[in-house]
Image: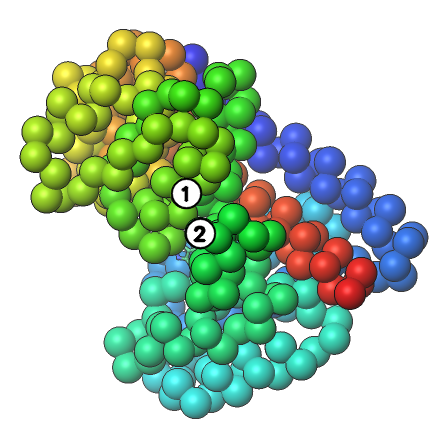
Amino acid sequence: MIIDGKQLSAKLKEQMAEQVVELKAKYGRVPSLAVILVGENPASQSYVRGKIKACEVCGFESILITLPESVSEADLLAEIAKLNDDQKVDGVLVQLPLPKHIDEEKVIDAIALEKDVDGFHPDNVANLWLGKPCIKPCTPKGVMRMIEECGFNVAGANAVVVGRSNIVGKPMAKLLLDANATVTIAHSRTKNLSEVTRSADILIAAVGRPRMITADMVRPGAIVIDVGVNRDSETGKLCGDVDFEAVKDIASHITPVPGGVGPMTITMLMQNTIECFLNRVNK
Ligand code: GUN
């Protein structure tokens, strides 16, 4: 069965749009998200367009700030400071990656904790790992929502996450652990990778290598979630980390690329923006 992230996203955004009408009536304003895009990376431009469009669909206010590739770190930090101080803004997101002359860590640290809709701020990360209330990173949060949609009982299941990035792999493992899965993080140095992945009831691919998860690496009946967004070097088309055509007949559930995790990431960003809005108005 194919888990349709696009359809699930559309349903969740519709629900949020209804919620926003109530929020407006109760608090006199709607949630507001500010997005900063530096440079002209086509993938980043496309992601940012998707985020701004989702704000429209949900009835949020949005602010898009585009800065040239040559912008100085100081000027970018100044923009963030302005948005941090703007009482009408609930969420601040700086699209990554940033140009090499800008220190990404410094930029993430500069976003006010209460407006960190990505959940990348070190205090958010600490709270996640300590089991305290926090904003959860959008991609792993969306993956959990998709697994929930399968009606699968995560507690006690073997979950294998392939990839250990700060944005996906590591927080993904923590959310699965919180749902009482037995979690393995595999990566480029893992020995006997296929053996490890074949032990998975839930297999999450977040590596960034086109079709590296092949049919022989998947246990029959497993849930397979593909976080990869790659360009096929031959066709130029988008493809995931999973060999979809071969794996779809083995897995019980699988996510496509595009139309799987991608739309859910953006939808979870909208949920996080509402969460930040509510934290702020109820402070
Ligand atoms: N670049 C790739 N994924 C993300 C994300 O989730 N948030 C931000 N800010 N940048 C990204």
> Which amino acid lies under the numbered mark 1 shown in the image of this protein?
Lys
Can residue 141 be seen here? The reply is yes
Q: Quadrant of the C terminus?
A: bottom right
Looking at the rendering, in which quadrant would you find the N terminus?
Answer: top left
Identify which residue, 154 or 96, lies in the foreground.
154
Q: Is residue 199 above or below residue 13?
A: above
Residue type at the position of mark 2: Trp
> Residue 7: which quarter of the image?
top right
Q: Position of residue 155 (x, y in %)?
A: 46, 23
Are the residues tagged 2 and 1 within 8 Å (C-beta)?
yes
Q: Residue furthest front?
A: 130
Q: Which residue is mark 1?
A: 174
Mark closest to the chain's N terminus, 2 or 1: 2
Residue placed most toward the observer, 64 or 282 = 282
In the rendered image, residue 140, in percent from the top left (x then y), is placed at 44, 42
Instruction: Report the image quarter containing ligand 1.
Output: bottom left
Q: In the rendered image, which residue does mark 2 sit on?
A: 129
Residue at figure coordinates x 56%, y 52% from the top left: 132
User: How many marks can you see?
Assistant: 2
From this view, report whether residue 188 is shown above or below residue 223.
below
- How far across and down, in percent of the image, does residue 81 sit? 57, 83
